[in-house]
Image (tube, rainbow, N blue to C red):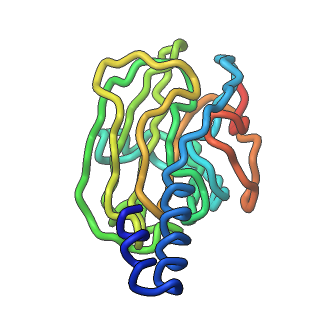
Amino acid sequence: MIATIFLNFLSTFLGLIGLLLSVWVYYFFRDPERISINDENYLTSPADGEVLMVHEVDGPKELGLEGKKFTKISIFMNVFDCHVNRTPCAGKISEILYKPGKFLNASLDKASEDNERNYYKIINNHGEEIIVVQIAGLIARRIVCETSKDQVLEQGERIGMIRFGSRADIYFENYTPLVKVGQKTIAGETLLAKK
């Protein structure tokens, strides 16, 4: 904001650009309160954004889950979406794994394996593994983890954020997806899947 004031002294036009950029950054880093359903029979969206894919895949090999079948839903967050990520279910974080990588366009399928990412393995109250993966994108260069291993969370609680355009993947078993490709989601509120 101080830079905006300084730019305004140099030029009204530069001051206006600085003001618009300041407003956009404030908007981007917003962290609205969300009201989650708090129902073990549903998974809520871990991210605001647009559903890119819904399909059956092997679990993430980084967590030793290759060969185990999961439903995977990928949600792309553009630069106008809120980038705070939330837990899709109540449970305990049994593992957090950071993997450095590239910064390709997060909407590409290969971003799940090539890009910088952070894995959260959550054991829900039924003893099932729910995996959330934060994936950095072309513009996003920083994943922020706000949780720790063995932390117990309620459905919809914050787990972290990704700065600028990025993606969140969720892997689960024993639930039926409720969303379709192209659908918009709201973290902590949109019902993603049902038991």
Q: Residue at x 73, y 54 (%)?
A: 184
Q: Residue at x 52, y 13 (%)?
A: 125
Q: Position of residue 101 (x, y in %)?
A: 26, 64
Q: Residue at x 39, y 85 (%)?
A: 10
Q: Position of residue 145 (x, y in %)?
A: 33, 40
Location of residue 17 with respect to 68 vertically, above or below: below
Question: Horizontal placement of 146 versus 70: left or right?
Answer: left
Q: Position of residue 160 (x, y in %)?
A: 41, 40
Quadrant housing the C terminus: top right
Residue 140 occupies which quadrant of the picture?
Answer: bottom left
Residue 11 occupies which quadrant of the picture?
Answer: bottom left
Residue found at the very far front of the displayed protein: 9
Q: Position of residue 154 (x, y in %)?
A: 53, 18
Question: Horizontal placement of 182 versus 56: left or right?
Answer: right
| Residue in the foreground of this view, choosing between 61 and 181 | 181
Q: Residue at x 51, y 84 (%)?
A: 12
Location of residue 140 with respect to 31 vertically, above or below: below
Location of residue 99 with respect to 164 vertically, above or below: above
| Residue in the foreground of this view, choosing between 13 and 70 | 13
Quadrant housing the N terminus: bottom left
| Residue in the foreground of this view, choosing between 49 and 94 | 49
| Residue in the foreground of this view, choosing between 104 and 32 | 32
- Give the mark count: 0
Residue found at the very far top of the displayed protein: 125
Question: Horizontal placement of 4 versus 171: left or right?
Answer: left
